[in-house]
Amino acid sequence: MPTSDYFVQPDDVETIQLDWGTLKWMNAPDVTGCEEFSSGVVLLKPGKGHERHTHPDSDEILYILGGEGEQTIGDETRTVSAGEMVYIPKGVEHSTMNTSWEPLRFLAVYSPPGPEAEIREVDGAEIFPPGEVPSE
């Protein structure tokens, strides 16, 4: 748990590791108490991504921080890279794939919160406590 109500460090929150990448939810109701939105950093491994899915009750924004990937929203697919933002309306199928040799890094935001908690329940998800560094 953060030592401040306003500042959250990566070591303050758990790390979720999946076969396709790593996530840290830096803002969620259980971290900051914010009930309006959640946000976190996602790292997709080279050549990896997640399958098409929806968030029926939450809009999503992805802000690409580094790397390059392929983003599909509904029937539209395009290349995304650092500096771009993607908006995914609630209930619309989408997927993200890393198409580069380096990690695809992005900030994910859900409004309202909820999907970030569901990711913890995905088969194969490994949860590492705050401060613990996962190994490859």
Image (cartoon, helix red, strand yellow):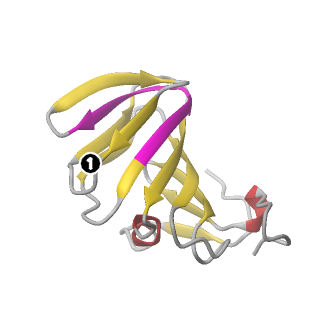
Please report the residue visible at 51 percent of the width from the left and 67 percent of the height from the top.
36
- Sort mark 1 into few (<14), some (14-19) or many (20+) by Cα contacts within 10 Å: few
Quarter residue 24 falls in? bottom right
Residue 51, position in %: x, y?
26, 48
Left or right: where does residue 65 sit relative to residue 113? right
Amino acid residing under circle 1: Glu
Q: Tell me how many marks there are.
A: 1
Q: Specify the farthest residue to the front.
A: 36
Q: Give 42 or 83, whichever is nearer the viewer.
A: 83
Asked if residue 111 lies in the magenta stretch, the reply is no
Q: Magenta span: helix, strand or loop, mainly?
A: strand
Left or right: where does residue 10 sit relative to residue 45? right
Please report the residue visible at 55 percent of the width from the left and 62 percent of the height from the top.
16
Residue 17, position in %: x, y?
53, 59
Residue 97, position in %: x, y?
36, 35
Region of the chain picked out in magenta, as a range: 61-73
Left or right: where does residue 128 sit relative to residue 132? left
Which quadrant holds the N terminus?
bottom right
Q: Give 82 or 87, whichever is nearer the viewer.
A: 87
Q: Give 120 or 61, whichever is nearer the viewer.
A: 61
Residue 26, position in %: x, y?
65, 60
Please report the residue visible at 66 percent of the width from the left and 54 percent of the height from the top.
135
Residue at image mark 1: 51
Q: Give 40 or 50, whichever is nearer the viewer.
A: 40
Please report the residue visible at 33 percent of the width from the left and 47 percent of the height from the top.
50
Left or right: where does residue 59 sit relative to residue 39? left
As helix, strand or loop, the secondary structure at mark 1 comes to: strand
